[in-house]
Amino acid sequence: MLLSDKITGGTLAALGAAAFLYGSKLPPVPGQQVGPSAFPMVVGAGLVLCGSLVIFGIGRHFEEVAEADVASHIEPEALAPLPAWRAWLALLPPALLGFYALASETLGFLPTTMIMVLTASLAFGAKLKLAVPLALIAPFVINLIFLKLLRVPLPGGLLPFPW
């Protein structure tokens, strides 16, 4: 087991524990079974679980098998360096988050999120026939979860949620 896996897994688990602890201290909403504490607690528990899996190296065997399988099938031209613009992909999520903060009140949640999902999908290599349906469906599903389950309204803007 690598020390870096222990540090990474421990950090992930600690962040998850902090999110869970913070979420558990949020006050409940009277008359609702699911309140504001549910989301941070679910995410925190998931992070603790994932961090624990990384710490104990569960699943490492699958990585080794996949790496060996890929290594035996790699063509020499596939080892060429990535284009320079790929190095900038790490800045895309924060840029999209900034775009959401600036545009969501004016455009609304649905159009803003459609643009974000389409941009991220295409930038990270998805084919257009997958990226477009994902960009059309995902914002509606996310909005439905926020409205019906969490009872948190999202910005309506130009295209408000239909129900």
Image: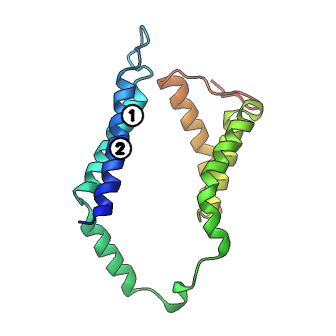
Query: Where the C terminus falls, by quadrant?
Result: top right
User: Quick check: can you spot residue 129?
Assistant: no
Q: Which of marks 2 and 1 is nearer the N terminus?
A: 1
Task: Examine the image and state in which quarter residue 49 appears.
Answer: top left
Q: Nearer the viewer, residue 69 or 59?
A: 59
Picture disc at residue 112: none
Name the amino acid type tagged 1: Ala
Picture disc at residue 47: 2
Name the amino acid type tagged 2: Leu
User: Quick check: can you spot residue 99?
Assistant: yes
Number of residues whose C-alpha sits closer than 10 Å to that of mark 1, classed few (under 14), some (14–19) or many (20 or more): many
Number of residues whose C-alpha sits closer than 10 Å to that of mark 2, classed few (under 14), some (14–19) or many (20 or more): many
**Image point (32%, 55%), residue name:** 7
Secondary structure of the residue carrying tag 1 is: helix
Q: Is 73 on the left or on the right of 95, as rendered?
A: left
**Image point (58%, 82%), residue name:** 81
Secondary structure of the residue carrying tag 2 is: helix
Q: In x, y percent, where is residue 91?
A: 63, 56
Q: In x, y percent, where is residue 60?
A: 27, 65
Query: Where the N terminus falls, by quadrant?
Result: bottom left
On screen, 26 above or below 161?
Answer: above
Q: Name the residue under label 1.
A: 19
**Image point (26%, 53%), residue name:** 53
Q: Nearer the viewer, residue 142 or 45?
A: 45
Q: In x, y percent, where is residue 106?
A: 77, 32
Compute the Cα span from label 2 to label 1.
9 Å
Identify the residue at the far bottom of this view. Answer: 76
Q: Are the residues tagged 2 and 1 within 8 Å (C-beta)?
A: yes
Task: Examine the image and state in which quarter residue 113 appears.
Answer: top right
Task: Examine the image and state in which quarter residue 5 appears.
Answer: bottom left
